[in-house]
Amino acid sequence: MKRIVFKYLIFCLSLFLFTQCEKDNSLVNTTKNAEIIDFIPEKCYCCWGWIIKAGSDTIKADQLPNQDIIGHEINSPIKVTIEIGEKTIVCSSSPFYKFDYYEIKKLILND
């Protein structure tokens, strides 16, 4: 009986680990129309950075190519076109943070 329970627990643990390793790279190396909707100035893990709405996805960036133009105070959404690079920090697996960080290779202000 103990052996069956042990095998079942190993199976459940393996299943859990494999389903948690899913990689969503659908945004990597894409160009999207987006809106910069907020900036979080707190310097903690997965806090600092710009919050960007790109289609139905929301991402964060800790650096922007021309951040002097955008600034750190966002009063209303800023429409931009961005070229998204690699995922740099994974925060979505944490119960406290929702958005992953991506490299922003290029940023163009839209009128």
Image (cartoon, rainbow, N blue to C red):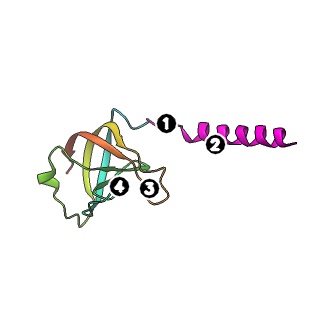
Which residue lies at the image location 49% right of the left edge and 36% below the top edge? 23
- Which type of secondary structure does the marked residue at label 1 adopt? loop
Query: Mark 2 is on which residue type?
Result: Phe
Q: N-terminal of the two: label 2 or label 4? A: 2
Q: Nearer the viewer, mark 2 or mark 3?
A: 2
In front: mark 1 or mark 2?
A: 2
Q: Position of residue 21 (x, y in %)?
A: 54, 38
Q: Earlier in the sequence, mark 4 or mark 3?
A: 4
| Mark 4 → mark 3, Cα distance in angstroms | 9 Å
| Disc number for residue 67 | none
The label nearer to you, 4 versus 3, is: 4
Q: CA distance from mark 2 to mark 3?
A: 20 Å
Asked if the residue at tag 4 contacts the one at tag 1, i.e. Cβ–Cβ closer than 8 Å, the answer is no
Pointer 4 residue:
46
Can you identify the residue that label 2 sits on?
Answer: 16
Does residue 82 appear to the left or right of 9 in the view shown? left
Specify whether residue 6 is painted magenta. yes
Labelled pair 4, 3 in contact (Cβ < 8 Å): no
Q: Which residues are magenta?
A: 1-25
User: What amino acid is found at the position of numbered circle 1 in the picture?
Assistant: Lys
Q: Disc 1 and disc 3: Cα gap in Å?
A: 15 Å
101 horizontally vs 93: left or right:
left
User: How far is the residue under mark 2 from the one under mark 4?
Assistant: 24 Å
Categorize mark 3 by other alpha carbons within 10 Å: few (<14), some (14-19), many (20+). Answer: some
**What residue is shown with label 3?**
98
- 1 vs 4, front mark: 4
Question: Disc 1 to disc 4, how far (Cα)?
Answer: 18 Å
Residue found at x 53% / y 37% = 22
